[in-house]
Image (cartoon, rainbow, N blue to C red):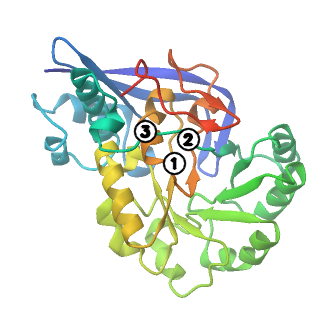
């Protein structure tokens, strides 16, 4: 078994801004695992919010002793390195078996899922223009988390009066700000709020009214996160770069549903290769947010298909 890791850069279609900053490109790591006959691929996006960098994640991957299987990867922490390796191993196993990854996982054949399309944080006027341009999309996600969020939210609703809206505050609000905004979120038909408070300060959500479902993002990584979410959240956002791959993502989904949470399946900004395994987790989810490739100016060969039915599962050429 041989493991190789390379860096790839994908240009974004436009500047993408959240409350933590702006970017013009997606920097990802591509992992290839080969047995000499077959090769599997996986992609991850190291995230500075979790103390990751391209260099640190590359080092984690390169230090893995081979041969290794998916169970053995649990020696690594949940995060980007384990994600890319885990997904590459799923792809390798599928190629070896001549089957699709969903078959190996014991899942029914996947279908398309309507995905959110994310609007970049900008002035209210610019966000209204973005919303109007994408008003044909059934589900829009807006990045907030600043002191001036209400004009932006009002502008997006005006630009896309018929779209369902979800909001991602990226840990940018306080408990007081969230309590003040909640009635306006209801008035404007917001269907879900992601991570309104910083992960380390979300105990303030206990006992608070949640007229709009609240989703744990930065507060939820893998199954070990679930006990600390009780009484605070209604939904968990499953991202493979947080769970450490498809293996744990499927387990987190089962555990979360069993505990009464609804599921959102999200992503970092990456290529179709990063989204492909997540389409299996997204089947039947309350919210699917796998729009990474839609934000890119360029993508992998054999990319995922996006159409009026949503994001489709990958071809075998791409992954799995």
Marks 2 and 3, the one that precedes in the sequence: 3
Q: Choose between 2 and 261: the one closer to the eye.
A: 261
Residue that carries the numbered disc 3 in the rendered image = 109
User: Can residue 140 be seen from the camera position used here?
Assistant: yes
Coordinates of residue 71 in the picture (x, y in percent): 16, 44
Residue that carries the numbered disc 1 in the rendered image = 266
288 left or right of 87? right
In the depicted structure, whether residue 10 falls above or below residue 150: above
* SS category of the residue bearing label 2: loop
* SS category of the residue bearing label 1: loop
In the depicted structure, whether residue 212 falls above or below residue 222: below
Q: Choose between 96 and 46: the one closer to the eye.
A: 96
47 left or right of 97? right
Corner quadrant of residue 280: top left
Alpha carbon separation for disc pair 1 and 2: 6 Å
Q: Residues within 10 Å of mark 3 (few under 14, many from 20)?
A: few
Q: Residue at position x 53%, y 29% from top?
A: 26
Farthest front residue in view: 108
Marks 1 and 2, the one that precedes in the sequence: 1
Residue that carries the numbered disc 2 in the rendered image = 290
Coordinates of residue 218 in the picture (x, y in percent): 46, 59
Alpha carbon separation for disc pair 2 and 3: 18 Å
């Amino acid at each position: 078994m041989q493991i190789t890791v390379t860096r790839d850069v994908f240009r974004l279609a436009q500047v993408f801004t959240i409350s933590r900053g702006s970017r013009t490109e997606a920097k990802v790591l591509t992992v290839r695992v080969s047995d000499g006959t077959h090769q599997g691929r996986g992609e991850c996006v190291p995230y500075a919010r979790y103390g990751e960098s391209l260099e640190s994640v590359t080092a984690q991957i390169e230090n893995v002793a081979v041969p290794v299987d998916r169970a053995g990867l649990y020696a690594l922490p949940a995060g980007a390195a384990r994600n890319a390796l885990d997904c590459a191993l799923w792809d390798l196993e599928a190629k070896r078996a001549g089957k699709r990854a969903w078959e190996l996982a014991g899942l029914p054949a996947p279908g398309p899922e309507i995905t959110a399309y994310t609007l970049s944080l900008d002035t209210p006027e610019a966000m209204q223009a973005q919303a109007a341009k994408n008003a044909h999309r059934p589900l829009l996600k807006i990045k907030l988390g600043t002191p001036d969020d209400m004009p932006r939210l009002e502008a997006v609703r005006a630009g896309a009066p018929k779209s369902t809206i979800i909001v991602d505050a990226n840990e940018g609000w306080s408990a007081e700000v969230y309590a003040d905004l909640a009635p306006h979120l209801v008035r404007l038909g917001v269907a879900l709020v992601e991570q309104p408070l910083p992960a380390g300060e979300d105990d303030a959500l206990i006992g608070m009214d949640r007229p709009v479902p609240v989703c744990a993002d930065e507060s939820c990584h893998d199954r070990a996160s679930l006990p600390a979410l009780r009484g605070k959240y209604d939904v968990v956002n499953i991202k493979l770069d947080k769970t450490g791959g498809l293996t744990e993502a499927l387990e987190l989904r089962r555990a979360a549903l069993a505990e009464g949470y609804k599921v959102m399946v999200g992503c970092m900004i990456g290529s179709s290769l990063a989204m492909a395994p997540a389409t299996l987790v997204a089947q039947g989810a309350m919210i699917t947010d796998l729009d990474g490739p839609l934000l890119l100016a360029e993508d992998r060969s054999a990319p995922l298909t996006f159409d009026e039915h949503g994001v489709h599962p990958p071809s075998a050429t791409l992954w799995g």
